[in-house]
Image (cartoon, coloured by chain):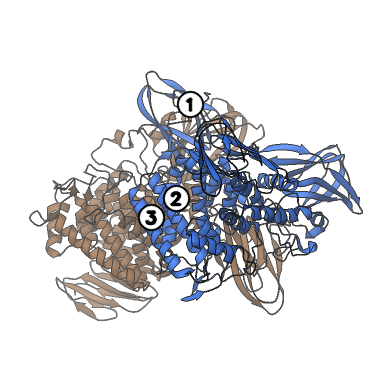
Chain colours: A blue, B brown
Amino acid sequence: MTEHSQWIWYPGDYEIWLHQKASVLRQYRGYICPPSWRLDAAYTSVKFRRKYELAEPAELILSAQGDFVALLDSDMTPIPYKRNPVTSIRLPAGEHTLSINVYNDREIPALYAAGAGIDSGNGWEVTALNGSWLPAAHWNFDEIEHPPQAFPFSYKECDPVSAEQRDEGELIDFGRETFGYVEFHDVKGNGGIQLYYGESREEALAGQLAETFDVLDVDGSVAQVWRTPVTRAFRYIHIKTNDDVEWGSVKHLYEFLPMDQRGSFRSSDGRLNDIWELSAHTLQLSMREFLYDGMKRDRWVWSGDANLGFLINNYVFFEQDVTKRTLIALRGKNPVDIHINTIMDYTFYWFLSCYDYYLYTGDLTFIRSNYANMLSLMEFCLNRRNDKGMMEGYPEDWVFVDWAPMERRGALTAEQLLLCRSMETVAYFARELEDDRNERKFAALAGELRERIFQSFWDEERGAFLHGVWNEELQRDILKYPSMFGVRFGYLNAAQREAVKTGVLMNESVQKIITPFMRFFELEALCELGEEEHVLSEIRNYWGGMIDLGATSFWEEYDPNLPPELQYDMYGDKYRKSLAHAWGAAPIYLIGKYILGVQPVEAGYSRYTVEPKQGVLEWMEGKVPTPRGDIAIYMDSDRIVVTTCSSGVGTLVFGSEGMPEASEGKLTPLEDNRYELLLEKPDYTYEIKLNH
Amino acid sequence: MTEHSQWIWYPGDYEIWLHQKASVLRQYRGYICPPSWRLDAAYTSVKFRRKYELAEPAELILSAQGDFVALLDSDMTPIPYKRNPVTSIRLPAGEHTLSINVYNDREIPALYAAGAGIDSGNGWEVTALNGSWLPAAHWNFDEIEHPPQAFPFSYKECDPVSAEQRDEGELIDFGRETFGYVEFHDVKGNGGIQLYYGESREEALAGQLAETFDVLDVDGSVAQVWRTPVTRAFRYIHIKTNDDVEWGSVKHLYEFLPMDQRGSFRSSDGRLNDIWELSAHTLQLSMREFLYDGMKRDRWVWSGDANLGFLINNYVFFEQDVTKRTLIALRGKNPVDIHINTIMDYTFYWFLSCYDYYLYTGDLTFIRSNYANMLSLMEFCLNRRNDKGMMEGYPEDWVFVDWAPMERRGALTAEQLLLCRSMETVAYFARELEDDRNERKFAALAGELRERIFQSFWDEERGAFLHGVWNEELQRDILKYPSMFGVRFGYLNAAQREAVKTGVLMNESVQKIITPFMRFFELEALCELGEEEHVLSEIRNYWGGMIDLGATSFWEEYDPNLPPELQYDMYGDKYRKSLAHAWGAAPIYLIGKYILGVQPVEAGYSRYTVEPKQGVLEWMEGKVPTPRGDIAIYMDSDRIVVTTCSSGVGTLVFGSEGMPEASEGKLTPLEDNRYELLLEKPDYTYEIKLNH
């Protein structure tokens, strides 16, 4: 085996296959809960090919996941091989094309080839016999003995932090929200062990009302280890048995994706530090094969949820393989029959996520390989516009926006803003990929739509976007969503920004947002409008409120006004709320982007800004990961210390009452006692003395 | 279980699933031979639903192929059930909608429900979570214990008709081409038994050069039955062993689809009778889950081959479920990436097959359920037209027409004729389904194309179609194909018909056709041009020629001019030719339609013609199956006896030198000593005395 060889397959099929298997693992009291959208499958029959030139005949080591046949050039007689898991074929000298068909209806058809200068790491193409050849895909499956099957998770054995004897058994507590298997060691006897899982203590003690439970049937008399058959999300487990079964110890096998926690944040505010750390734990739990919403529920991949998770990840783990897998899985295969996750807005978030991915990573290769899928998804959207060029929900669509009362029929302003931004994204990628025709087409479409949105929905008098139009009637309600998106996408001028800030976003009489999902965009918009102090205080109160209620990870939904005994309710079920939901980790993003103040300006941080906002904090420090290494920031009232990453050019912007002094570079004064410093040196620590 | 209950599934998915599994059963000397086109898969996650109204709560008996969960109305808490293969749920009284999600990644997700007045036989809808609900599909899986898995074949145990000891073992002969497993009874000892299969004696004796072989590893000392692991097509088997293995007897388990041989033909010409019977056997071998080309090779489903097979079947078995399954499997799922079987003409034959299916059966329900798939396949074609509105092969396309030397680049006249006929077919179905917009659209497109074909390719002087145009240059060769299609589709006027008959089809200097595939259309065209006598003689010579070479079924290809020792060659391989190829059964169609002379005029034989052509035969008799029962014909030089089917109106047309006399009805004289008689009475035997 050479070090270049890898398992290869049809592009996207590992992700599509894995997504299907992973999407049906959710259970509810023992019943399956398949997602409410189409699940796609990998192609079962694919053909790999590789041109080669050999001076002498050579042996090619081969292994396939599936049954295979190898052919040379146009010869229809197979090249013989022995039916071993690892085998070899003899390649004749000269210039030839080797083709290998692989069929597999269980796992993805995949191939490993090593030797003869044509290792499966590069130069191989693949077709699903659908008229086109693509470069074969690969990912981290480098060993011929380990084809791409189960996802390569890591595991860690954990002991409970406490155990409490109850009349009917024992309640064990692992100290914080976790995920994985449960093991019983030194088991003796015969009978059933019941496990009731709880993200909360209350849920674990609710018996058959717990959302998930397992029964282990123990039938051995020899002391041994029994493991639960499926992975579960929990903190507590209520273990019961009515039978003659004993065990020595209960352990938990934590299943996770190993990731470096590259981003960090510490400050003089301990509560804020706790919120940051719990946010990181919350996101870690959802970042696995894909970026899930939450591992108890829904244990599904949702495009809107993932959009936030990706952004948060960019400020803590910067693990981009999860993002790529998730974007591929969400897009699925053609034809596009329905919106992603059946939700109209979630189709748009997919485009926005592609944009964010490229902005933070600069990875144009991935964008290029998904560009055809972007165009066809956008085509699906274009075909669903009404005669005003706007998108309304079809009967089979879910128009979500947020969990909040609102009119969902007709053309919602928030949805048109998302569509407009999606079109801009396609135009932007078309430009990056030198597809002039589509750049012009989508830039024009986006420009027209943006104009129409303002004509139709911007109320100059009230200084706000109206909600939308239904049945030819303007819906005059004012909700926060269009304002948040308008700010986010840079669609508002200075006067409009000021108007929505005071009249909508900071207006106590406008309907409040109670999901961390939309709080993310709300608080982001407020940061964009210079309200970082207010946002920090909101973070302390809202996320801190969950900690006060015992949270060890952040929730799917939190309404501070509900009594504690109703906090776990959802969908009319006592414990259905997810207590570890990726979007709950928003503070990492808000702090990284607006308090530490680091963000890319050009794709992949080739240009970036650092604009730290210490505010009421006595001091703060932290790191923000980039594809070029980490950017480190320290700030107190006397100084700012910034260590740059290994390439790219940053711009440091900061306020200083007196004249500051930089260890390197030329300070440029801006308005409002603010200064700018170009961070040109890579891997360099700039120190700025403030207020001199 | 009530008698109405059936296993139900997502429409088309049983066929798609079965097609994928069946398509990879072909082997070549032990290696897989996956087809060179995309194989589609069934959806893995589907949701069934049924509205009901109950006065009292009731039990619904349930079984699912796959894991399932049942929900009532919008309630998110599952209806509980026991995890038995057959279980039940309790339905509350009132008006409700019951939904059942089924997930299965191995077989198709399927459901059986019985009781409560909502048996799964009717009223159930299903979605693949792709935005639309369709009526659930079902087919002959009526027993709750037998979900839709393996295809329900029949089996018959057969003994060899002879066995011949050879130095290295024995050669057994089953007397004619067959298909299935081989069993060794009363086996003793240890070691391997090698089986070399031959459609010909020569192939079986060729050892490792045989196309298919098996090795049975026998490891028992107790006398027992050993069966080969896979089904094979063969007549002869050369059995060898080098080990200490003995067996009592070798038997063959013939695997087949049981069908009534409703059609028949007997005449004063024994050779013709033999050809008809061998044709029936040939077709029977290929009619199974689907209509295959041939069971040794390719053991695949090809649209052009199937087009002929369907037509032949209409004159012998009239087994339409095979046709329906085949049409669904060939069309596959969306998106359409490439032509059916990758062959441009084979896409067109799919449309033609749909037309034929409807003409012979009158089954508009099937056409309606496939109409969306017709439109999208035609859309794919429309998008591939060149600036002259004609279709040329793309680089990834196979332009087949026939195995014969010809220019395949550019726009071939034969292909445009097929495209034109396909467009007419879509227009025709649009009319039947009252889709006015598409009727107008495709009628106009077909009309324009037909005009352009004549303008571009009809050479008035030579009285023939030219071959095509490539690179802006007219290809002036004259081949038979466009003439055959022109006659077949009724595109030629009387003068043009006469011109192509004498100048092309009967012209010895025009390149001869050597495949039974195109001989089918050639001989059909000659029959249409009144050359039934000539055609009968061709059948006697060409098909009779194969019998003279020992055929027990008809071949994929036959060139009477080749020496016997080269007759089994194909693709440069000594025994690769298929000796039982569905399209070899053409005589049944030609005899049924033009000699017995029965054909539908309106869909489903609501109007039909009977125009028997006794010709040089002293007498002939036969039956032609219709959806309304069989039509029986007897004819000799003195009389014609026709027994009508149970409904529909036929027209008998026949020649008579003297004035004929009919037992019933009024004879109308036509030109050329021909007469017409309306066959108005159902299930009635008309007798006509000739030449009085």
Query: Disc 3 to disc 1, how far (Cα)?
Result: 77 Å
The chain that hosts pointer 2 is A
As helix, strand or loop, the secondary structure at mark 3 comes to helix
- Confirm whether residue A564 shows in the render: yes
Looking at the picture, which amino acid does disc 1 mark?
Glu
**Nearer the viewer's eye, disc 1 or disc 2?**
2
The chain that hosts pointer 1 is B
Quarter residue A683 falls in: top right
Whether labels 1 and 2 belong to a single chain: the reply is no
**Image location of residue A17, percent across then percent down:** 55, 46
Relative to residue A350, is residue B563 drawn left or right? Answer: left
- According to the image, label 1 marks what residue? B168
Answer with mark 3 or mark 2, whichever residue precedes in sequence.
2
Looking at the picture, which amino acid does disc 3 mark?
Ala
Whether labels 3 and 1 belong to a single chain: the reply is no
Looking at the picture, which amino acid does disc 2 mark?
Asn
Query: Disc 3 to disc 2, how far (Cα)?
Result: 18 Å
Q: Residues within 10 Å of mark 1 (few under 14, many from 20)?
A: few
**Nearer the viewer's eye, disc 3 or disc 1?**
3
Of the numbered discs in the image, which one, if any, rests on residue A364? none
Relative to residue B543, is residue A268 drawn left or right? Answer: right
Query: Disc 1 to disc 2, how far (Cα)?
Result: 60 Å
- According to the image, label 2 marks what residue? A373
State the residue in front, B613 or A28: A28
State the residue in front, B177 or A176: A176
**Image location of residue A344, percent across then percent down:** 52, 61
Of the numbered discs in the image, which one, if any, rests on residue A443? 3
- Confirm whether residue B161 shows in the render: no
Quarter residue A28 falls in: bottom right
